[in-house]
Image (cartoon, rainbow, N blue to C red):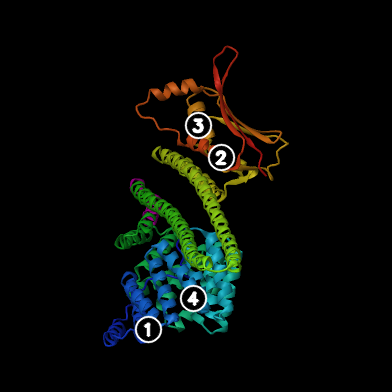
Amino acid sequence: MKTPIIKAIFIFFSLSVSAQTPELDSLILNLNNHPAKDSTRAQLLLDIAIKLRRINPNEAIPYYADAFETAEKAGVFTIQSKANNGMAICYGMMGEYPSAIEYFQRTIEISKPINDLTRVADGYNGLGVVYKRLGDYPQSLVYYTQALATYDSAKDIMGLAAAYANVGVLYDLMKEPVKALEYYQKAIAIYTKENNPLQVSIAKSNIGVLYVDEKRYDEALEIFKYNLRVYDSLKRDAEAINTSNNIAHVYVKQGKYADADVLLKKNLQLAKELSMKQEQTSIYSNLVEVALATGDLDDAIRYANEHLNLVLELKSKYLLAEAYEVLSRVYEKRREYSKALEAYKEHKAWSDSVYNEDNARAFLAQEVKIEVLEKNKQLAEQTLRLEFLQAQVQQETRQKWLLAIVSVLLLASGILFFQKFTQRKRMNALLEEKNERISKQNARIEEMNYQLENRMLRAQINPHFIFNSLSSIQHFITGDDKHAALKYLTKFSHLLRQVLESSINGNVLLREELKLLEMYLELEALRFDNNFSFDIYVNDSLDPDTVEIPTMILQPLIENAILHGLIPKQGDRKLNISFEADSDMMEIRIEDNGIGRDASRKMQEGKIRQNPSRGLAVTEQRLSVLREKYGWQSSMHYHDMVDASGEPAGTCVILRFAIMG
């Protein structure tokens, strides 16, 4: 078990329960006494919204909206920009990310014309936080980089330091400790120069956590002890207790159990006095580890039970899974195996609940990204429609003027008629130019539609594949094969990350697709107890580092060969995948020595309920889209193989399409 260690994370959104009621009441009273829609009222509304945001962001939004409207009427654009940014922060705090993204983007649009660079940087920084929470780390880094550049241009030193710290957290989440350390140190340099010891200590705490992960315990202790002295001097009791717990955790890692025990018991007393229940759970967890290490099983079971009782009060699923795991290990050490088993079952139940919630949040994040993309598409379409309507209005206006000019020219002499002809010719040229622009815009819309359709077809494959993999993991868990389940889950997590990264582009290099297929086949072999073998062959005429292939286009065909061809067969099972080059065409053969398509079809007819092969249908759709859009030559054929006696000997799928790269 990984014992908890407190990490100081820099965030843009945060909730605080420390309500300043008297100050808030005073602001509301002043607002009621100032009905005029001027800058003073706008500032009062903004101040009230800021106070309310720390208590209840949902209640703060109407005040921000009123401040925005009042500032707009009063012509105070800086307050208008701050109010809009405040609404974006509230939506981010409530998890309404599409609205948060919309308002942060509007903050940037409002602030640029008035040259409020600090608020522009705040908008970029907020977008970085939202996309970090959505798990889109590359896009988050793009916005953080824009925030850094804008804070620097605005000479906003503290904003720059906060952005550096945010980038450090992002690299920490991306498992790049070297870069995370670099940005933490940049933030520390600014906070030190600005004489802000609290922020210096927070940044150093994150560096200390990095050192613990790298087993640089002495360096981590030096940082934590320095921070403890700072927090004590600033009377920051909560931060002091967290830092003291981190020191005790390092002592446990170093085997200094006596020192850890003394420190943890002292921290436990302080945490109880301050009603810091979350911190108490971390202390109890460390105390259990010390008791187990020193062989004091009576203390270990006492601490484990107190830990569990406290977590039950907090009602945290994650902490409950951890508490039952700790209790199970203690019972096992005490040779109370039946109790250990019961505790472990509780641990697994809560762990599964946390895992399911994490999956739900991951899918929700994907839905949010799609929703944001759809909003941007709608906005683009509305913009094009508005431009078209404006062109129509302008055209109608020109035509009215043209009719008036024609009426006058009919009464004029031949010279005036010549002038009228020249003017009409010029107007026709302008109209043709407008029509040409509209045609180009229609072509762009058509291109966007093709790209969206291609992405939607790829997106149908990945959930199908993920569902089958999760079903395999569930199969091992229900079969009580813990080792196989953990091994499968580890491989699946690596595969899933690579699938998500490769799904950004329509095509990937052949080498990347080969790596993806090999990982997938290893998972399927592990799922079926390695009762089939596979071989992948690539002809030397194909360069895997230059040739491209549509992402995940082979996976449904391979899955079909394994499930419906090889698995039902008795005896030796083998799957061969070959990549050949024929002139400017690539030929891929997926050959299995299974039961054949006729036997598989008969087996399926005997089942009450059949699941249609969505993956194969989507593969055919993708090939159809590629042929329609790019004119690619492609085909997919099935060949039923027979042995010398004419009996079915497997199936061969032949897929051909133009070589890309």
What residue is disc 4 on? 111
Front one among 468 and 386:
386
CA separation in Å, label 4 and label 3: 55 Å
Q: Please state if 215 lies on the left or on the right of 307 as rendered.
A: right
Front one among 184 and 109:
109
Taking the image as drawn, is residue 557 in sight?
yes
Q: Which is closer to the viewer, label 2 or label 3?
A: 2
- The disc, 3 or 1, on the residue closer to the chain's N-terminal end is 1
Amino acid type indicated by mark 3: Asn
Taking the image as drawn, is residue 1 in sight?
no
CA separation in Å, label 3 and label 1: 65 Å
Q: Which is closer to the viewer, label 2 or label 1?
A: 2
Q: Residue 118 carries which label?
A: none
**Chief secondary structure of the magenta span?**
helix
- The disc, 4 or 2, on the residue closer to the chain's N-terminal end is 4
How many discs mark residues in the rendered view?
4
What residue is disc 1 on? 43
Residue stretch rendered in magenta on the structure: 322-339
Q: Residue at x 66, y 39 (%)?
A: 659
What residue is disc 2 on? 628
